[in-house]
Image (cartoon, rainbow, N blue to C red):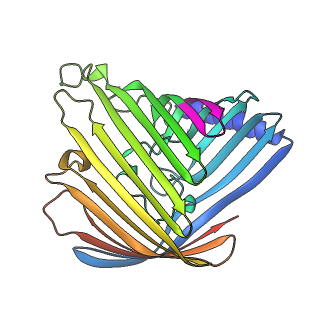
Amino acid sequence: MKRKIGLLTAVALSGAAYAQDVKVGGYVDGGFNWTKDGAPETSFVTNDWALTLSGNSGGSFAFVEVSNSPLIPGALAATQFYGGHKYDNGFSWKVGAFNGLLGSEDNESVNRAFIHEGLVSGVFYATYGGLHLGYAASDSLNVDLVIGNGEGTFGPTPGLDPTMWALKVSTKMDDVTAYAGTEVQKGSSAKAGSGTDGETGYKIDVGASAKMGELHAGAEVAMVKAAVANADSGFGFGVHAGYDAMENVALWARFDWGNKTFVGGAESGYSLTVGPTFKMSDAFNLRAQWTMAKAGTGADAAQMIDVMGVYKF
């Protein structure tokens, strides 16, 4: 698997090296965290970061992102690396590892209003490894299909069939966006006799958001079913709202809830996050947020306070 990833990374890098338009970018997101889940703990942390290299020429493009490895703590990895082509008729394709399709919140913290991803959006694959096919039917309608693996891998996902399918249909009209999508994957034949063989697991996601003057609002509904015989379906929903209080100050709030199957616990779980965002410059935002979350156990809800600055270059 390492050789395959290394080869695709080399292909993406070589494409960027010969592109007419090559850009280096990235972001750093870090600051202070206080957590009370039992005994209070405080620390200065790096919440997220990435270094990117991109290039395009005549419709062809390549992209490489280096960040913390999602599999090996403390190690670096190419978390995204892909190459592809976009055609004038609206069709496009890319192959490699890239961010997932589903979830109302972006996988990259620099593109989110909230420091940490919500309970509902966090249930979907953060990245895929495989082939992405896209079609822009019009300025307001897009269709995306992915055939590959979850979590950016190029080998079989443990316990699941090697092939995952993801589909998303999205639309945007003025300041209103909406989408619906699914991820489908079967249980692995390597687990024949364990109750998972031949069972199909799925995740379904439907969301919408709108901006009305100084107000922002959005909602997301999700259903999940594990690739296990007779598994119950999990259900969760999330809502968020924002208000541009001043030119460079916005107030945000988000609430997520999931039943016990959705959160994988003995009871339902929830999370609530509130706090302001300060736009210090076009490149730097400062966010201060309080979160209370219960993860489906009988324990008391955990609390967290974050003060994080994210700089994009």
Q: Residue at x 44, y 36 (%)?
A: 181
Does the magenta-highlighted stretch encompass residue 141? yes
Q: Residue at x 37, y 58 (%)?
A: 239
Whole-percent x, y for residue 265 in the image: 18, 51
Whole-percent x, y for residue 312 in the image: 66, 65
Whole-percent x, y for residue 97 in the image: 57, 38
Q: Residue at x 24, y 77 (%)?
A: 39
> Which corner quadrant of the image does residue 249 belong to?
bottom right
The residue nearer to you, when weighing 14 against 61, is 61
Which residue range is magenta in the image? 131-144
**Residue 205 shows in this picture:** yes
Whole-percent x, y for residue 161 in the image: 37, 24
> Which corner quadrant of the image does residue 278 belong to?
bottom right
The residue nearer to you, when weighing 270 against 94, is 270
**Residue 71 shows in this picture:** no
Q: Is residue 37 left or right of residue 308?
A: left
